[in-house]
Amino acid sequence: MQYRQYGKLGYQVSAFGMGCMRLPRILRGDHAEVDRERAWEMIRYAADHGVTYFDTAYGYHNKTSEEVLGEALEGGRRERVKIATKQPFGVMQDLGSGGGKTLLENARRNLEAALKKLRTAYIDVYLIHNIGARDWEAIKAAGVIEEYEKFRAEGLIGAIAFSYHGDYAGFKPVLDYYDWGMCQIQQNLIDVDREATEQAIRDAGKKGCALVIMEPLRGGNLAVPPAPVQAIYDTYREKRSGVEWAFRHVLNYPEVSTILSGVSTMEQLKDNIDIFSKPGAAAESLSGEEKRLIARVREQYLSMKSISCTGCEYCLPCPQGVNIPQVFGKYNDGVMFGTFEPSRRSYMFQVRSKQDAGLCVKCGACEKKCPQHIGIVKELETAHERLKGWVE
Ligand code: SF4
Ligand code: SF4
C-alpha cells in the first residue's frame, strides 16, 4: 500500500481510503439496508491489509454507515486507522429533532451521536459536509467553525475539514477563509475541469491543506469502459483496467493525500488495494503518452452524451425547484457509461431534496432561456422515467 502525507498534520495515511457510502446492501421489500456481515468483513479486511483511512458521514446508508464502521473496527483496529466523518449544515439546522436546542447545540448533539455510533472517543477528521455557495455565508454567520474548534479543544475531534461540490469560484473563498486541516473535492479523468477543478488541487496543496479526492470512478461508472473507450485503452502496451486508469489519473497529483473509493464487494476492495500497492502508480508518474491517452478517453466519453446540455444553468431557477442540468447530467452519465444504476442511486438524493424532474409542471419557462434549444420538458420526462425508483 502506498502512503502519503496528510497535509501538514504530521501523519501519513494510505493513498486508498475506504469510502463507506456504497457498502454491500440487502433489499428488504421497499427498502434496502447494509449487509452488516459482509460490510464488517470488508472493513476488517481493509484495515488488516494496509488501509488506514475510512470515510463515512452522518447520512450515508440511512444514517447507519457510521454505526457499521464503528462495529467493524471495534476490538483493536480502531487505534490503527483514521476515521473521517461529516455533519451537514442542513442537519444542524434541523431543530425540529433537537428538542428546543439551538443550531450549535444541535451540532454538538449530532457529534456526540456520531462518536457513540463509531464506538470511539475521538474522530480524527470532522467535516462540514457538502458546503455549497448557498450555505457558506450562513455557516460562517452561525459560528459553526468556532464550534468545531471547541470540539477540537475538548479532544473530541482532530482536523477540522469540509467537503465541497460546486465550481471553483465557490470553492476558493471557502478554502481561503480558514486554516482547514483537510478539504474533500471531486476529481476524475472526465471531470478534470469540472466542479472545483485541478486549480483547487493546486491551491489546497500550496496551503498545506490535506486533500482527499472523492468520486475518482464517477460513482463507479468508470469501472466498466464501453467498447469505444476500451478500444482506446487497448492501444496501450500494458493491459490496465478502467479502474486502474482512473486511479492512476488521480494518484498522479502529488497534492492528493488519499483517494476515496466506495467499494461494494470484497472483489472490488481487493482489486483496489492491489492497484494502490503497485510501485508504478505514484505521484507524477504518468508519461506524456499516458496523459494523451487519458485525454482521448475523456473526449470519447464526452462525445457519447445524449442531451447536449452544457450545464450553463441559464434555465434556472425553475419555479418548481427542478435542477435541470443535474437531471440531464445524471441521464447523460447513464447513456455515456452504458449503465443507469449509479445515476439512479444519485437521483434518489435529488428526489429527496425536491429538485427532481418529477416536479416539472411543464410551464415551459426554462425552454425559452436555453441557448442550446433543448426540448427540456420532453427530455426531463424521459430522464425521470429512466432515473426514478431507487430505494434505500
Ligand atoms: S417547464 Fe418544468 S422544469 Fe422548466 S421551468 Fe417549468 S416547471 Fe421548471
Ligand atoms: S440552459 Fe440548456 S444547456 Fe444550459 S443548463 Fe439549462 S438545459 Fe442545460
Image (cartoon, rainbow, N blue to C red):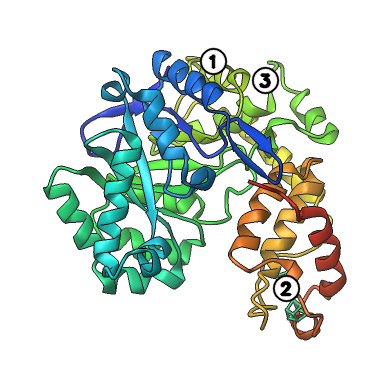
In-image side of 176 versus 275 (left or right): left
Figure check: 119 above or below 115: above
Q: Which mark is residue 274?
A: 1
SS at circle 2:
helix
311 or 359: nearer the eye?
Answer: 359
Q: Which residue is mark 2?
A: 359
Who comes first in sequence, dot 3 or dot 2?
A: 3
Tell whether label 1 touches label 2 (CB within 8 Å): no
Q: Quadrant of residue 307?
A: bottom right
Figure check: 163 above or below 250: below
SS at circle 3:
loop
In-image side of 243 versus 140 (left or right): right
Closer mark to the observer between disc 2 and disc 1: 2
- Whole-percent x and y of residue 17? 44, 30
Ligand 2 under 8 Å from disc 3 Cβ: no
Q: Which residue is mark 3?
A: 240
Identify residue type, mark 2: Leu
How packed mark 2 is, by other alpha carbons closer than 10 Å (few <14, some 14-19, many 20 or more), is some
Who comes first in sequence, dot 2 or dot 1?
A: 1
- Whole-percent x and y of residue 101? 27, 68
